[in-house]
Image: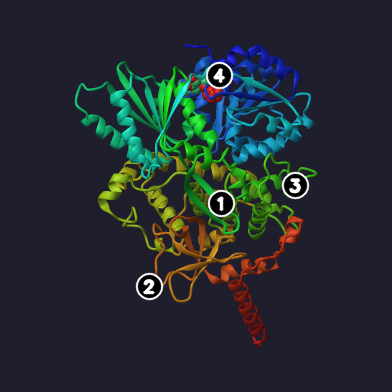
């Protein structure tokens, strides 16, 4: 096998790193940045004074690359080479001791490194920090870039920072780091012929399928990489392609195997793409944009590029997420095409005309920081207590909009994480230490006070484990029912959080029996992961909570009261910035807060109407998502009396003070009215003799 390009530059790399605190390394995908750079620096003694951290924006890449490097070094994963992703740390305690003598390579997600810097802002355990895949411009990597800029000043003598990228505008990053060195590692890409469609496809799954079969029948051997937008498309494509290939006339072409590749695939399925095809067999790899740069699949000669990607987009003026299928950027299109030329000249079938590529595609993908809710990141930055930090002026490579930062400040204020002057509160500090989004950490803190921590831990674990507890697809279809359980106890009508809790409760009562999961069509792997996450969260909260923690309740699941009042109250507090009120004459809702808009309960919700067919007057929601209409996903029924204090807080809110800038306080009209009514009612009540 050919030597990876980066290894031919070993001397040059070491020389440049020796002489410079920050180096930008630009190299073609597959040139060996993720797997080899850390090993080069390890060989050259950089691990004598600390570990090497290599960050990855994607969990699957952190795990996969760490596995690969452990294999190459012939060591046990979790020992000299480890990985850390949220809720899964494969770096043993022994490693930490060993590291002092032998040195360790630690692959971790950019989010995990950010979290580590919370307890250790100087990140002293590391002698080298490599921010890998910086071209992905993930939210956390962008924040790390800003933090590294500070850190290289304070630790200039004993820290090296490397920023690696396949496509990044090196000059821009170098300028950000006051003109640091840029090293270009030329790759060995073979020419790739680009074949455009004459018109934009209306059904990219169908067009990709047709193109894939054409290649299989007409083209010489070589694997085919097909880019789809998400798991659903991938599943569809895999089954259709398998079916069509089977139906091809026997002996008419070589054998074929079809492999899916996406972030939520179990690890044993992911590694299958790294094994070469058996003799006389063509592999079809159907992937998300994960195969653009994060994971390099060898043997690909043909690429089918539908020209789309699924992108999550947050709108700070509506507080709403949308999951849109959008056109890729030119940089992405070129990355996709490049995957075909790694072993020999290849072909890229672009299912769009050349004019679309030239005139419609953006130059580069919009960085995540400019299309995400920033509440979690702002809370995190606030909790770092950096002396001169002003969130609105933080040094970002590409700053987010002021609107988006103010939106984050308002959200944090409403859930008590910052005070009216924008200063972090003690609640905010505890929240920042929990590896959860702000609303869930706030819920846990409140639940601890109210005595329902055990239940809240379960809900937080399920919602944050990024898995879905749902019946397996085929069975669900078979039964054609909305809820996986028909035998849940009373109370599931309070909403989705409560139902998720009840599912877990039932499993707990079945002594975590795995057969029980199968009987109820639940994914065993997901349920086990949930249990593990719950345990971890419970340990973290015991460590960090300032007041006493209901340890007993946090460790072992304890069944609660029937109407789940306490838990719903805690959720109401945690989601204090995500409230909605039912409209007077129908079952639609409008959101309450500094913006009011019409929203519906998502059709998948289990929220129940009363005997009169009315849904609850007030709900909190986990997120607003704009699909065909604006929908609230994961809702929980709450009560007016719990909501009022939050509305009052909102009324007092002054964005100007929160941000220290020129903002305005915004309270939506329906809420003003409500507050006025409630103040009049209070005034009247106080006039009553016995009040
Ligand atoms: P880059 O970071 O520059 O994109 P990598 O270091 O990820 O490059 O990849 C270098 C080589 O190692 C590629 O040929 C890739 O296929 C291979 N490789 C990376 N990860 C794995 C893995 N988990 N299993 C097998 N091969 C891998």
Q: Which of pointers 3 and 1 lies earlier in the amino acid sequence? A: 1
The location of residue 278, given as percent across then percent down, is 32, 18
- Neighbor class of circle 4 (other Cα within 10 Å; few <14, some 14-19, many 20+) is some
Depicted 604 relative to depicted 209: above or below? below
Please give the label number shown on residue 393: 3
Q: Secondary structure at mark 1?
A: strand
The residue where tag 4 is placed is 187
Residue contact at pointers 4 and 2, CB within 8 angstroms: no
Residue contact at pointers 4 and 1, CB within 8 angstroms: no
Q: Which of pointers 4 and 3 lies earlier in the amino acid sequence? A: 4
- Neighbor class of circle 3 (other Cα within 10 Å; few <14, some 14-19, many 20+) is few
Closer to the eye: label 4 or 3 = 4
Residue 76 shows in the view? no
- Depth check, front residue: 553 or 687: 687
Q: Which of pointers 2 and 1 lies earlier in the amino acid sequence? A: 1
How many angstroms separate mark 3 from mark 1 (CA)? 21 Å
How many angstroms separate mark 4 from mark 2 (CA)? 65 Å
Please give the label number shown on residue 613: 2
Q: Secondary structure at mark 2?
A: loop
Please give the label number shown on residue 314: 1
How many angstroms separate mark 2 from mark 3 (CA)? 50 Å
Colouring used for the render = rainbow
Q: Quadrant of the C terminus?
A: bottom right
Residue contact at pointers 2 and 1, CB within 8 angstroms: no
Q: Residue at x 64, y 45 (%)?
A: 433
Q: Is residue 227 left or right of 383 when viewed as pictured?
A: left
Depicted 19 relative to depicted 83: above or below? above
Closer to the eye: label 2 or 3 = 3
Closer to the eye: label 4 or 1 = 4
- Neighbor class of circle 2 (other Cα within 10 Å; few <14, some 14-19, many 20+) is few
How many angstroms separate mark 4 from mark 1 (CA)? 36 Å
């Amino acid at each position: 096998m050919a030597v990876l390009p980066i290894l031919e530059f070993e001397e040059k790399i070491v020389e440049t790193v020796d002489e410079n605190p920050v180096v930008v390394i630009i190299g073609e995908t597959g040139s060996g940045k993720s797997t080899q750079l850390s090993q080069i620096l390890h060989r050259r003694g950089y691990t004598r004074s600390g570990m090497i951290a290599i960050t990855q924006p994607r969990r699957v890449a952190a795990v996969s690359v760490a596995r690969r490097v452990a294999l190459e070094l012939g060591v046990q994963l979790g020992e000299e080479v480890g990985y850390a992703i949220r809720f899964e740390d494969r770096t043993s305690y022994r490693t930490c001791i060993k590291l002092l003598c032998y040195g360790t390579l630690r692959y971790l997600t950019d989010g995990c490194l950010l979290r580590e810097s919370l307890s250790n802002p100087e990140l002293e355990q590391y002698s080298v920090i490599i921010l890998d895949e910086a071209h992905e411009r993930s939210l956390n990597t962008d924040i790390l870039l800003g933090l590294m800029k500070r850190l290289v000043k304070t630790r200039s003598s004993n820290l090296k920072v490397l920023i690696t990228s396949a496509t990044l505008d090196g000059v821009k990053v170098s300028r950000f780091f006051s003109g640091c060195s840029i090293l270009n590692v030329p790759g060995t890409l073979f020419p790739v012929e680009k074949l455009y469609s004459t018109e934009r496809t209306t059904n990219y799954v169908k067009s990709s399928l047709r193109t894939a079969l054409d290649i299989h029948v007409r083209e010489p051997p070589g694997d085919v990489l097909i880019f789809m937008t998400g798991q659903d498309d991938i599943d569809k494509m895999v089954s259709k392609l398998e079916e069509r290939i089977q139906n091809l006339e026997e002996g008419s072409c070589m054998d074929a195997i079809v492999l899916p590749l996406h972030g939520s695939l179990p690890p044993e399925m992911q590694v299958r793409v790294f094994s070469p095809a058996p003799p006389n067999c063509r592999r079809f790899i159907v992937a998300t944009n994960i195969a653009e740069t994060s994971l390099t699949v060898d043997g690909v000669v043909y690429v089918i590029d539908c020209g789309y990607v699924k992108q999550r987009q947050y709108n700070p003026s509506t507080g709403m997420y949308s999951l849109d299928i959008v056109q890729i950027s030119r940089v992405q299109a070129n990355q996709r095409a490049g995957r075909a030329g790694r072993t020999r000249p290849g072909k890229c079938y672009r299912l769009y005309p050349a004019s679309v590529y030239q005139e419609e595609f953006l130059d580069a993908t919009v960085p995540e920081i400019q299309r995400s809710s920033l509440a979690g990141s702002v809370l995190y930055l606030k909790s770092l207590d950096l002396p001169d930090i002003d969130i609105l002026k933080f040094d970002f490579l590409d700053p987010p909009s002021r609107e988006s930062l103010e939106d984050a400040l308002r959200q944090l204020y409403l859930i008590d994480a910052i005070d009216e002057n924008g200063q972090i509160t003690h609640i905010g500090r505890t929240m920042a230490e929990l590896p959860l989004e702000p609303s869930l950490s706030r819920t846990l803190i409140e639940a601890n006070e109210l005595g329902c921590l055990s239940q809240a831990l379960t809900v937080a674990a399920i919602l944050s484990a990024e898995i879905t507890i749902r019946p397996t697809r085929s069975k669900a279809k078979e039964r054609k029912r909305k809820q996986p359980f028909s035998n849940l106890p009373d109370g599931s009508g309070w909403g989705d959080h409560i139902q998720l809790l009840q599912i877990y409760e039932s499993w707990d009562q079945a002594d975590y029996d795995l057969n029980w999961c199968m009987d109820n069509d639940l994914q065993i792997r997901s349920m086990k992961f949930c249990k593990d996450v719950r345990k971890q969260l419970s340990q973290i909260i015991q460590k960090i909570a300032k007041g006493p923690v209901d340890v007993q309740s946090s460790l072992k699941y304890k069944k609660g009261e029937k109407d789940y009042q306490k838990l719903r109250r805690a959720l109401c507090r945690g989601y204090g910035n995500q409230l909605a009120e039912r409209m007077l004459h129908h079952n639609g809702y409008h959101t309450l807060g500094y913006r009011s808009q019409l929203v519906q309960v998502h059709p998948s919700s289990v929220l129940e109407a009363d005997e009169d067919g009315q849904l609850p007057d007030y709900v909190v929601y986990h997120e607003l998502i704009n699909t065909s209409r604006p929908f609230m996903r994961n809702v929980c029924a709450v009560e007016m009396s719990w909501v009022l204090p939050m509305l009052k807080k909102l009324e007092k809110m002054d964005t100007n003070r929160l941000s220290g800038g020129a903002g305005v306080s915004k309270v939506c009209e329906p809420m003003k009215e409500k507050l006025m009514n409630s103040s009049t009612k209070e005034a009247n009540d106080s006039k009553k003799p016995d009040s």
